[in-house]
Image: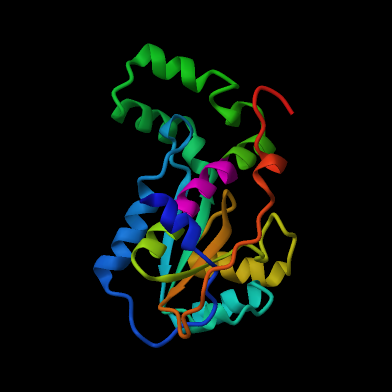
Amino acid sequence: MLLEEIKSRKSVRSYNEEPIPDEVLNEILEAGRLAPSWVNVQPWKFIVIKDEKTKELLFKASGEQKQILGANVIIACVADMEAWDKKNFGAVLEKSGRNQMVQDFILNSPTLNPSLLGDFERLTRTIEQLTFAVAYMSLQAEKSGVGCCIIGALANEMTKGDENIIKELKERLNLNDRQVLLTVLSLGYEKTPRETKKIRKEPQEVIFFEKL
């Protein structure tokens, strides 16, 4: 039952040395690939990282969060604004079986295609979509018994962090100016298993019917 994984999921920041099998890692990545997105645009890229030098750079970019260095695998989650370009977006629409008339309608609608509104709107919608994939991967990790920590406090174009680190990281990951490293998932088997304790607002504070 998916709700059980949601209830038991927690941020795991300390890992043992047991490697994550390729088949388990592939299932986590597949969960992200299959996540829903606006008009199926899928504006994301996932980079699997095991290289220690890259981890060290991510460690610096994260304000020295140690779980990055201790992780067995890092998944870098990239917001890919190029996905909204007419050529790329159109190819996805065509592959999904939409006829030319429908494709043209979507591509020329500011409501459906935020790239028509400007860079801010394009980036905002891209970030919105990527969060779905991040959530799906974190839940698949939980289902697979893999500890996961979602790290969003990175030096990037959004946080206006250290420009030198941002530049070095983008070069190392081969990202262009329209691709933003939004977050990373640190993955590994929990070193000392602990109980999940969730502190959440009460249902009546966040759930409303018909109006606030």
Q: Quadrant of residue 183?
A: bottom right
Dominant secondary structure of the residues highlighted in magenta in the image? helix
Query: Residue shown at 49%/63% (left/top)?
Result: 9
Image location of residue 94, percent across then percent down: 32, 26
- In the image, is residue 158 above or below residue 116? below
- In the image, is residue 169 above or below residue 30? below
Q: Please, which residue is most extreme toward the bottom here? A: 17
Residue 61 as seen in the image, left or right of residue 4: right
Query: Residue shown at 43%/41% (left/top)?
Result: 42
Q: Nearer the viewer, residue 151 or 203?
A: 203
- In the image, is residue 160 above or below residue 147? above
Q: Quadrant of residue 156?
A: bottom right
Residue 22 as seen in the image, left or right of residue 142: left
Image location of residue 204, percent across then percent down: 69, 40
How many numbered marks are there?
0
Give the image's coloring scheme. rainbow
Q: Nearer the viewer, residue 145 or 87?
A: 145
Bounds of the magenta span?
A: 126-136
State which quarter of the image contains the C terminus: top right
Q: Nearer the viewer, residue 97 or 119?
A: 97
Image location of residue 48, percent across then percent down: 40, 67
Query: Residue shown at 57%/48% (left/top)?
Result: 178
Query: Residue shown at 35%/45% (left/top)?
Result: 34
Image location of residue 196, percent across then percent down: 53, 69
Q: Please, which residue is most extreme toward the top here? A: 101
* Magenta segment includes 47: no
Residue 42 as seen in the image, left or right of residue 152: left
Residue 49 as seen in the image, left or right of residue 177: left
